[in-house]
Image (cartoon, rainbow, N blue to C red):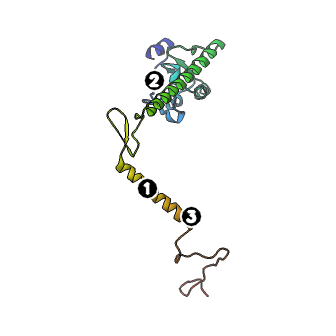
């Protein structure tokens, strides 16, 4: 990026990163990118290593580009990718790159779901071991009877509580009134408003 800045005759004034954040994440989860866009002024250039670092959702990328354009700045990719100018060919190239970035994100997601489904079908752990289960070193899951008993206690207690709510409050106390009857509080002797 430094080399590209030099080639463009631009001064590199800041580096913003979203460490550990996927390009597929929504803009609200990209504080580094938002800070970089916020710091731009008229004539500035936002340099990205690759265009897919802006995002892997074409709608988000279009929003970022629009924000940059409104500031009188532009986005340039160190990898090229149609960011040298705004000719029809360059705009088309950017849209194609954005579409392939989204396609790659969708492929990764589909492969991950398929791999996790396959593991679950084989009885292997896929992610965190859920409460009530234990994992063997092989990854196979087996029931933890102590935790399963705790789950049954919670489920039974919840069922009893919900059942009690359906019946209403216990009889013989409280301040229930028959339906349709209401009364206002009556002033007592200690009430200063009493006459």
**Numbered label attached to residue 13:** 2
**Looking at the image, is 130 positioned above or below residue 72?**
below
Disc 2/disc 3 C-alpha distance (Å): 65 Å
Q: Earlier in the sequence, mark 2 or mark 3?
A: 2
Task: Say how many tags the image has.
Answer: 3
Disc 1/disc 3 C-alpha distance (Å): 18 Å
Disc 2/disc 1 C-alpha distance (Å): 57 Å
- Indicate the secondary structure of the residue bearing disc 3: helix
Front residue of 117 and 175: 117
Where does residue 51 sit, x and y in percent of width and height?
A: 53, 20
Residue 44 appears left or right of 15: right
Image point (66%, 14%), residue name: 88
Q: In the picture, residue 178 is in which quadrant?
A: bottom right
Q: Is any part of residue 55 visible from this angle?
A: no
**Numbered label attached to residue 163:** none
Instruction: Say if mark 1 contacts mark 3, CB within 8 Å.
Output: no
Give the labeled residue for mark 3.
166
- Indicate the secondary structure of the residue bearing disc 1: helix
Nearer the camera: disc 2 or disc 1:
1
**Looking at the image, is 176 positioned above or below residue 31?**
below
Give the labeled residue for mark 1.
154
């Amino acid at each position: 990026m430094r080399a590209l800045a030099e080639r463009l005759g631009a001064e590199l004034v800041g580096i913003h990163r979203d460490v550990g954040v996927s390009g597929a994440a929504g803009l609200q989860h990209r504080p580094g990118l938002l800070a970089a866009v916020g710091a731009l002024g008229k004539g500035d250039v936002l340099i990205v290593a690759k265009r897919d670092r802006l995002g892997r959702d074409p709608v988000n990328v279009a929003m970022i580009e629009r924000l940059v354009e409104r500031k009188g700045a532009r986005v340039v990719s160190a990898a090229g990718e149609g960011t040298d100018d705004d000719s029809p060919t360059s705009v088309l190239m950017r849209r194609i790159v954005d579409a392939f970035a989204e396609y790659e994100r969708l492929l990764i997601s589909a492969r991950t779901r398929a791999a996790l489904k396959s593991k679950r079908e084989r009885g292997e752990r896929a992610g965190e071991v859920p409460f009530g289960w234990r994992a063997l070193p092989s990854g196979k899951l087996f029931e933890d009877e102590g935790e399963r008993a705790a789950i049954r206690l919670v489920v039974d207690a919840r069922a009893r509580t919900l059942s009690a709510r359906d019946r209403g409050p216990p009889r013989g106390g409280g301040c229930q009134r028959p339906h349709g009857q209401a009364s206002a509080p009556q002033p007592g002797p200690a009430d200063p408003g009493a006459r």
